[in-house]
Image: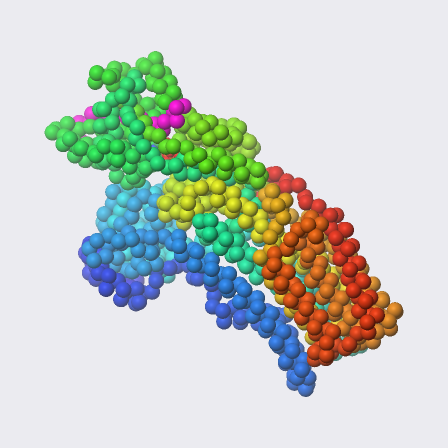
Amino acid sequence: MRDAGAPFWTEREEDLFAALGSAPNGLTSGEARERLVRYGANATAVSLQRSLLAKLGKRLAEPLIAILLIAAGVSGATGDWQSFAIITIIVLASIVLDLLQERKAEAAVEALKHSVAVMASVRRDGSLVDLPVHDIVPGDVVALRGGDLVPADGIVLISHGALCDESLLTGEPYPVEKRPGPCTANEPTDAFSAVFAGTSLVGGEATMMVVATGGGTRFGGIAASLQSRVAPTAFERGLHALGALIMRLTGFLVLFVLLTQLVRHGLTLESFLFAVALAVGLTPELLPMITTVTLSRGAVRMAARKVVVKRLSAIHDLGAMDILCTDKTGTLTEAKIVHVGSFDSAGAPASHVAELVRLNSRFASGLRSTLDDAILAAAPAAADGWVHVDDLPFDFERRRSSVLVARSGERLMVTKGAPEGVLALCTQVEASDGTTAPLDAARRAAIVALIDARGREGMRLLGVAWRRIPAERGTIAIDDEADLVFAGCAAFLDPPKASATEAVARLHKAGVRVKIISGDAEPVVRHLVETLALPARRLMTGADIANLSDATLAARAVDTDLFVRVSPDQKSRIVRALRRRGHTVGFIGDGINDAPAIHVADVGLSVDGGTDVAREAADIILLAPDLGVLADGVAEGRRTYANIMKYVRMGTSSNFGNMLSMALASLVLPFLPLAPLQVLLNNLLYDLSEIGIPFDSADAQELAKPRSWDMGAVLRFTLVMGPLSSLFDLATFALLRLGFGAEVAAFQTAWFVESIVTQILVIFVIRTTQPAWKSRPHPVLVASSLTALAAALLLALTPLGAIVGFVALPPAILVAIACVSLLYLAAAEMLKPLAMRAAPHRQGRRRSWPA
Ligand SMILES: Nc1ncnc2c1ncn2[C@@H]1O[C@H](COP(=O)(O)OP(=O)(O)OP(=O)(O)O)[C@@H](O)[C@H]1O
Ligand SMILES: [Mg+2]
């Protein structure tokens, strides 16, 4: 790239073209190909998917694993080759098992994400082509429209009222204007002629030449860190807290075992290894794998329903979501907007109003909205000799656009926009015969009533007004949007989506409240809600919201279902207010005006045809804009939650109970309750049995309500089921020592069998809140658990077990173990309702939201 020194925006356009070997017509595709090799892909975020080898290295370097391998090495050095070999094999086998599962899952999700990658309009070989953003190279000439992301750093060659949102980089909330020309400012924030990767165009149009790509961009690093810095969700925080708790308990237990062994036998290599093996057994090392695999299986299943998940953890957020905010167009309507006609201030069809609105649509620069498209589609815009002089592009705060046009010495400014807003700028009104009259209170009231009546019929309206401008004026400013003559309205229809009724009902049944947040007018939204028979309680307007403090808004927003005439900023304020009340909020939208709200929602959703900024801000993209598939997605999210909770329950109760019992037993036994090798083997087989969890199905009642992390429930489960499991372990222990007088080898074999049998089988009890026999587990889970169980029994009950020190057990002991295990399973089944009583989903105040 060019040498650093003076910032690129201080240089002249020609010099930059020369330095980068480019021209206003862009690069040839051959040249671009070479540059792509030279400069690398235009990607700032480092791939999260590390190589398999690096991941393996990271696992091996984990303290417990490292200690275990070192201890194995020491065993080997002292001549105990058998232990060395077996430990190493067990450790590596469990790591590889884990890694392969995770790898496969990640690859599937990565492929899905590619299908919704952002494209850019790039000039190659003289014409504009759509290319993936990461193929852009320095020297490329790129065309940008409102709603596009700026794909790389560069200078502005042409601008039509280009407005850039740089808030992500500068914190400055207002869009800044961009125009060509060298700029002397040194600070990027003042560089009006430069655009930067990571920002977006929110209005107007621009053509840029790329100066730096990928890691070479000014804010590349910041943008990447912003992207990855997604605040952890309640669920993730819960899992971390649990992991930390288990780690602490583990440390405690290991110290305890080491101390007692030290006091009683002096510290031997074997007792040290035993302690480490216990720690390994306790570590919820499968949790990341189970989470990733469960989520990615969810993602793949959702992809089949045309829902692409960009952020995996958004799936369980979807399951926890209890409020879904949606904009109107596209999700509740067909987004097939048709210009059905224009009427004058008296409500009579008026062709000259239609001509005015067409003039505006034809010459307005910047954001071309679906309304403009509809106007121009209804009739080709014959300019009738009018030429464009200047214009004020549309923005979502003003909700209008104006153009200045000229024809033979005459200059006219035509404004169109939200009718009540346009009317407020008018002081005169044009009658059907073309004469103008002052807009007195009575005339104003009549027009307001007319607009209201048409709105209630479901018509979306744009008010149209005009004013003459002195012929010498070449530009217009916002101040000129005053003293207008009200001409009439253009009317549009957008058919309601019939399928929305059922979809909303399904979401409601699933405990998800649907709120409509629209920039459109009240009567239009009301009409839609009535047509679709959507449940809707209170209504609030943007004007109401502007007068409320955040706290008051939060209190009122909860039981308001309709928000009308809200600005983009208010959309995100509403979402933040609802989140502050402890709700898990989803927001679905497609426009530039929706992007901020999508960004702050727990689950940001957009549709495939949406603007780049909306799609970039979203966690989930719907390839077909249909709320129905979202209801399926919600069920999917709850299922993943249920499956992850199964693993959590296993880890906190049976697994923990078993390890605890072993630590206690080591206190009183003259020998170790299990040899270190056997503990590791136990752990490996148990891991194996749980591999099927991500595949498992969830009971209907698990899917009926929003689910979010509930530490209380986890603790209750642990406090009931943990001691129960220990109780039966200790009974086994007493039986073996006092009843059968078992010595080392027999004791260890018997304990191993009891421990693994109960651990594995109890999963069928605690995987459901229903009676175990009523809920059918997934075949993969059955297969993985029974395979692990068979392997354990094969080892313990055949001569094969001699490798790890097992001996043949007398039938009496086997029968006793079988009885204890059965009793344990029965007791677990009986106590289960107490441990898993579904806590009512607490609406609101459930989660303290970090300010
Ligand atoms: N091209 C345009 N020119 C003038 N005014 C416009 C234009 N596009 C939109 N408006 C005005 O701005 C308002 C808000 O825009 P829009 O309806 O797109 O918002 P929204 O929140 O995305 O609505 P929805 O819920 O229907 O998706 C419109 O109701 C209309 O009055
Ligand atoms: Mg919209």
Determine the residue positioned at 51% across, 29% down: 536
The range drawn in magenta is: 455-474
Which quadrant contains ligand 1? Answer: top left
For the residue pair 490 and 254, the one nearer the viewer reads as 490
Indicate yes or no whether the magenta region holds residue 470: yes
268 in magenta = no
Q: Is residue 661 positioned above or below 225 on the image?
A: below
In this rendered view, identify the residue nearer to me: 764 or 286: 764
Q: Is residue 472 visible?
A: no
| The C terminus, quarter of image | top right
Q: Residue furthest right?
A: 738
Q: How many marks?
A: 0
- Left or right of 614 on screen, residue 669: right
State whether residue 5 is above or below residue 563: below
- Check the image and report above or below for 29 versus 630: below
Image coordinates of residue 55 in percent, x first then y, are 52, 68
Residue 158: % across, % down: 23, 47
Q: Name the foreground residue: 605 vs 575.
A: 605
Q: Quadrant of the N terminus?
A: bottom left
The image quadrant that residue 375 belongs to is top left
Residue 208 location in percent, x, y?
26, 51
Picture quarter containing residue 274? Answer: bottom right
Residue 285 visible from this viewpoint:
yes
Q: Residue at x 80, y 62 (%)?
A: 820
Q: Residue at x 23, y 24 (%)?
A: 351
| Rendering coords of residue 705 (x, y %) | 60, 42
Looking at the image, which residue sits at the far left?
408
